Image (spheres, grey):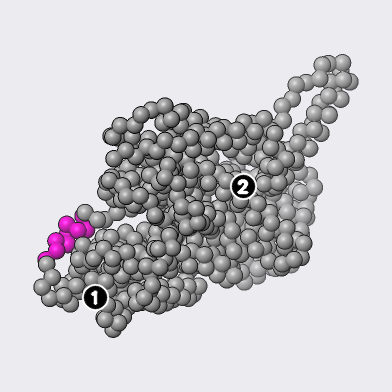
Amino acid sequence: MIYTVKSPALLIIGIIMLVWGGLNKSGTVDGMQSYLQKSAYGDHMKVKEKFDAESRVAIEMATAENKPAPEMKMPGSKFDHAKADQAQLSNIFGAAFVLIGLFTMAWKPKQGNLDYFTSVVPGVAYILLIAFIVRWGLDPIFANWGKAVKEAGILSWDFAKILNLNYVVLGIVIGMLIVNVFKIPAWAANGVRTARFFLKSGVILLGTLYSAAELAQLGGLSVILIGIFVLGSVGVVLFMGKRMKLPNSMTAVLSAGMGVCGVSATVAASPVVQAKAEEIAYTIGTILIFGVGCMFLFPTVGHILNMGPVQFGAWAGTGILNSAQVAGAALAFDPHGIETLKVAEIFNITRVLFLPIIVLWLAAWYVKHEEGAEKVNLAKVVVAKFPVFVLGFIAMFALSSLGTFAPAGHYQGKYFSSSEIKEDKLLKGKETRSLEGELTRLSAAEGTQALSKYLVDKTVVLEGHKVTSNETLKALSDLIANKKLSTRQQGNILKSLGKMEGFDAVAKGSIDKAEKAATHDSKTIKAYRNWIAWLFAFGLIGLGMQITGKALKQAGGAPLIIGSVVGTAKAVGSLIVVLMFVKEFV
Amino acid sequence: MSAPKFERGTSLSIFVSDRREDFTALIFAFIIAFGVMLTT
């Protein structure tokens, strides 16, 4: 079979990307970009204003001293970096696609590996182009519209935020539209099948963002929560399947899908219970239709209930069935941070780790209920079907826990460093004076008494011990003396102090400024997050392209009823448990 | 996915098996991880 389809599409996509890269580099689309990247553009204008003022002073000084005007270069702003990133990505991929596009047009394909892997490229380019449009265009446009509609008073809420119209949801919706309305073009069909591979790569790479300390905090909780809901779901599906007189193999495969991790669990359990192809299809259809609903509904409920990243991650990782949909919901809830995704994936991975137990259970159940069933080698099935990418995630996590990728303190994406604070970020006279005023007030007998009462009432605890008023006053006087924070601990103590009733607003602002100055972005972690976001964006657009009307229709009937009842019970039950027991501690 | 039938892989993957896909994803992810580590 020859896979390469002769089409100028790849060449055209490459040219479009190169043009976009060029337009960004030359500044031709700055007007459009200033709308799309409003926040970064605001930062750009501040940097420019400061630079213009400094330039004027430098020129005036040089003129007064009869010297030539100094040559000054404006420092790069977030806006400049964002445009440069877009130009770089567009140019790299654009050039590669143009070259491969020209090659495929000129080449007479012969059956073999070269034909097979070359034919994958147009589909990859197709999804990547959609990912560019969604991440750089549609996502910020909807975010701007949401804010504008709220600011104009047309709606009292930000519809883009509440309905999660970000690159994750928009990507999946566009994928679904393409496959159901326009169909996937023949030249892209082979490459679209890479979506799951990129999703798996994203999950493995996610391991770089965890530290052992974080997992230790969540581990016990995730095992208990997942254990209850996975085993409970499997048990309820087996019970209901029997009551509704579904075939044993159908019931067993549906229970694995509903209980563990969606499609992979279904596939892994199917040989154990000798499931037929249509039963696997029904189960996957049920998981997809229910999962798609959850993926859209969960983030909205999460925002309405004002859930934090840990709570939402725990809920999504427990309540949603499919690994990709867990990632989709977590990213939809928190598209620009990665905390929710990290927590959700820990719960998701914990759930996948239950797979061998479930497979053993189902095998025993099936053999008991199906007389004459052929004997199946359980160990062989587990070894053959256990998803290796889960082990990859754990290996990556082990390496990152050893500090291979970044120092231990960098894993939140931001880290504390007093020594890296720049001169111009130190506290100024007015700011230190406001802090001195508060130090004098709190050092007096009445102030110290109020401070001690506040620390006791609010149970301000740091690293396992209750913070004392002496520690607080020492942190404040150190900040005044050094004009910057010396340690993260002192920063945390002062942050609590800033929330004390009657604390001077200017002094609170000074603490916030000092905290911001000592907090730096980890370039490595930022780069990993960016890679993961792209891999997930790509994979989820491809996931959308797999949700056909046919697959959705297949979910009809008894499996859908059982699936919906169990899925809803699991979602609601895990929500209640998460709200009651999961606290925000990451 | 209403894709045409493929002689290699499945309708969801270009790889001949899930195991092959997993191992390739593993290698790809490690290349990115160490690439980022060495370049930032």
Majority secondary structure of magenta residues: helix
Label 1: chain?
Answer: A
Depth check: give the residue in front, A127 or A320.
A127
Q: Position of residue A500 (x, y in %)?
A: 69, 65
Instruction: Residue at 43%, 60% (x, y): give it.
Output: A548
- Residue A486, can we see it? no
Q: Nearer the viewer, mark 2 or mark 1?
A: 1
Q: In the rendered structure, which amino acid carries the disc numbered 2? A: Gly
Q: Quadrant of the N terminus of chain A?
A: top left
Q: Is residue A343 above or below residue A572?
A: above
Residue position for label 2: A137
In-image side of A405 versus A513 (left or right): left
| Bounds of the magenta segment | A375-383
In reply to whether residue A381 is colored magenta, the answer given is yes
Q: SS for tag 2? A: helix
Residue position for label 1: A247
Q: Is residue A176 above or below residue A79?
A: below
Q: Are marks 2 and 1 on the same chain?
A: yes
Q: SS for tag 1? A: loop
Q: Is residue A465 above or below residue B5?
A: below
Q: Earlier in the sequence, mark 2 or mark 1?
A: 2
Q: Position of residue A379 (x, y in %)?
A: 17, 59
Instruction: Residue at 64%, 55% (x, y): give it.
Output: A142
Depth check: give the residue in front, B32 or A396.
B32
Q: Position of residue A466 (x, y in %)?
A: 55, 64
Label 2: chain?
Answer: A
